[in-house]
Image: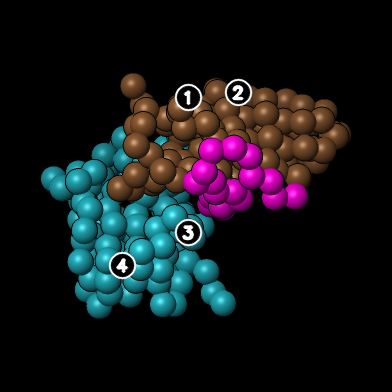
Chain colours: A cyan, B brown
Amino acid sequence: EAGVVQSPRYKIIEKKQPVAFWCNPISGHNTLYWYLQNLGQGPELLIRYENEEAVDDSQLPKDRFSAERLKGVDSTLKIQPAELGDSAVYLCASSLRGRDNEQFFGPGTRLTVL
Amino acid sequence: QKEVEQNSGPLSVPEGAIASLNCTYSDRGSQSFFWYRQYSGKSPELIMFIYSNGDKEDGRFTAQLNKASQYVSLLIRDSQPSDSATYLCAVNDYKLSFGAGTTVTVRA
């Protein structure tokens, strides 16, 4: 069974440019999470989806970050415009509905903003 | 105060020794606790979870939970070089909150 797939794995952009990350969760997993992980820190939740509905986006900086999961499967996280402080690893995770104790993480996208 | 605090490390132990990792959490109502292992440049992977007070053993790993003290720990017995990684403590309330992690290096 394929795990959580993310692309790209690495992205380098200049500040003020837009960037998008893509995630395809494990097949059958209704719940999808986007996390941000800064160097030397644990992951921090940005947004959680149940199918296509964002049920927790309280930590998402909505002035520049947006996310969508239109068909309740794969998801895109966008930053526009990117700032230097956005340099981090963006992790996607998925779980079965109601099984958020068993999250499976993707490999992440390492973003560098110059 | 952060929700989840871990001993900062790094922790260096000789091969075959016991590595002891500590974690405290702020929300007394927390019910479920997790330890994730993260190799450098890789994503976190779940290695242990514990819900009840006491010890839970899985192979060379033992998780210990004391809800009265709001404390959860992870012991790695017979440490191997392959155990060298960052260990993240996580607490699940309405969301999974992670500590900053403790980096463990096992010296051959």
Q: Which residue is mark 4?
A: A75
Which region shows up in magenta? B40-59
Q: CA distance from mark 4 to mark 1?
A: 40 Å
Nearer to us: label 2 or label 1: 1
Q: Which residue is mark 2?
A: B9
Give me the residue at 82% from left, 38% from top. Answer: B78
Which of the marked residues, 3 or 4, is nearer the chain's N terminus?
Answer: 4
Relative to A50, is B60 above or below?
Answer: above
Q: Which structural element holds mark 2?
A: loop
The percent coordinates of residue A56 (x first, y second) are 22, 53
Residue A102: mark in rendering: 3
Amino acid type assigned to the residue bearing label 3 in the image: Glu
Give me the residue at 46% from left, 27% from top. Answer: B68
Q: Which structural element holds mark 3?
A: loop
Quarter occupied by residue A41: top left
Whether the residues at callouts 2 and 1 have beta carbons within 8 Å, the answer is: no
Between A70 and B101, the residue placed more toward the observer is B101
The percent coordinates of residue B6 (x first, y second) are 51, 27
